[in-house]
Image (cartoon, grey):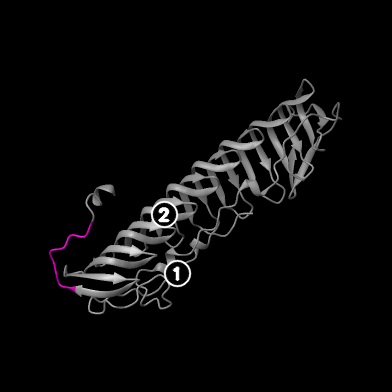
């Protein structure tokens, strides 16, 4: 079934910063939220890997053992108390495949060809197009105690455009390749968060936007379900971080701006301020400093400082 998305969990706290007290620990791991003014606790929660069809056994069907004329009367299958009835078009000959699966529908050259319904011996049911005993074309696949996939198939696997619906209410709509989410897609978790963007081998990978149920969002680049590259992370109160990430943590150059206008421009490592940085209060007063592992180690009142890398603002 669909997995809980841990990033949907709400985390709130008091965020304060005083330029007169710049030597406080502002890192990711600070247990005191009043000190961890950058809300790192929100960011470092890992993404759960979205559930995937590959966790369920998808079978390839070859040949047949025997064929016989369909008996009269309504034929149906049941999954999770849901009755699936055959249409008139699908009522035809019935064959048993070599793995024991039962197919009923259109048959050409003694093989499943055309539209029909397939009862697999693992409890799954497929309804749709078949070519030479292979799931191929458009159809609906009902996984036993799993999701329902409605879309395009190739060589027995989800391939092309499709919709994946999980028992807990989570839904993915988008592109598939060889049975995996790949390309552009939208995933909505049952907890209320969602991601829209690029996927690769069932993982959030590439460029996309992730929204939390409490109003936060991240828009930028991802690598294997983690924020990685340039991105913007914004909180519901309006403050945001625009900068570089490595594996879900701030790393490289970034700008953090509070809702009241205060900001930090500078360098980060492992989620903490590390290197040269410039603090600007809401009145515009500047203080230039050097950080190490989230702690301020030196500072001065030099105002003629330009720390933003050349071309940075053009990349927004």
Would you identify the image quadrant in which residue 40 lies?
A: bottom left
Report x, y in % for residue 135. Answer: 68, 33
Report x, y in % for residue 279. Answer: 23, 68
Q: Is residue 274 above or below residue 178?
A: below
Q: Earlier in the sequence, mark 2 or mark 1?
A: 1
> From where the camera sits, is residue 259 visible?
no
Label total for image: 2
Report x, y in % for residue 224. Answer: 49, 52
> From where the camera sits, is residue 179 visible?
yes
Frontmost of labels 2 and 1 is 2
At x 55%, y 55%, the residue is 49
Position of 40 with respect to 171 (left or right) is left
At x 66%, y 49%, the residue is 55
Would you identify the image quadrant in which residue 111 lies?
A: top right
The residue under label 2 is 228
Report x, y in % for residue 270. Answer: 39, 65
10 Å crowding of disc 2: few (<14), some (14-19), many (20+): many
The stretch in magenta equals 300-308
Position of 43 with respect to 121 (left or right) is left
Q: Is residue 171 above or below residue 59?
A: below
What residue occupies the far top of the structure in this picture? 109
Q: Main secondary structure of the magenta part?
A: loop
Q: Is residue 226 above or below residue 36?
A: above
Q: Nearer the viewer, residue 295 or 18?
A: 295
Quadrant into which the N terminus falls: bottom right
Numbered circle sitting on residue 280: none
Would you identify the image quadrant in which residue 272 lies?
A: bottom left
Helix, strand or loop at label 2? It is: strand
The residue under label 1 is 11
């Amino acid at each position: 079934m669909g997995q809980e998305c841990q990033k949907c969990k709400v985390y709130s706290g008091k965020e304060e910063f005083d330029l007169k007290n710049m030597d406080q620990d502002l890192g990711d791991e600070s247990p005191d939220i009043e000190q961890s003014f950058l809300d790192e606790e929100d960011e470092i929660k890992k993404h759960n890997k979205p559930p995937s069809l590959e966790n369920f056994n998808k079978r390839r069907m070859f040949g047949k053992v025997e064929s016989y004329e369909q008996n009269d009367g309504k034929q149906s299958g049941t999954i999770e108390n849901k009755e699936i009835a055959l249409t008139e078009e699908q009522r035809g000959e019935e064959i048993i495949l070599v793995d024991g699966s039962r197919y009923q529908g259109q048959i050409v050259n003694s093989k499943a060809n055309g539209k029909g319904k397939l009862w697999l011996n693992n409890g799954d049911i497929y309804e749709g197009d078949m070519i030479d005993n292979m799931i191929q074309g458009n159809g609906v696949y009902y996984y036993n105690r799993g999701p329902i996939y409605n879309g395009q198939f190739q060589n027995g696997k989800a391939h092309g455009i499709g919709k994946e619906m999980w028992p807990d209410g989570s839904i993915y709509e988008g592109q598939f390749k060889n049975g995996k989410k790949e390309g552009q897609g939208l995933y909505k978790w049952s907890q209320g968060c969602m991601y829209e963007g690029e996927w690769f081998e069932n993982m959030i990978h590439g460029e996309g936007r992730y929204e939390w149920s409490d109003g936060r969002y991240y828009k930028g680049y991802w690598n294997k379900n983690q924020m990685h590259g340039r991105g913007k992370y914004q909180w519901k109160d309006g403050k945001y971080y625009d900068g570089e990430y490595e594996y879900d943590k701030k790393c490289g150059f970034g700008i953090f701006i509070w809702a009241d206008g205060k900001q930090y421009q500078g360098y980060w490592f492992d989620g903490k301020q590390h290197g040269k940085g410039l603090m600007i209060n809401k009145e515009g007063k500047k203080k230039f400093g050097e950080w190490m592992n989230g702690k301020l180690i030196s500072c001065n009142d030099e105002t003629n400082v330009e720390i933003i890398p050349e071309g940075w603002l053009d990349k927004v």
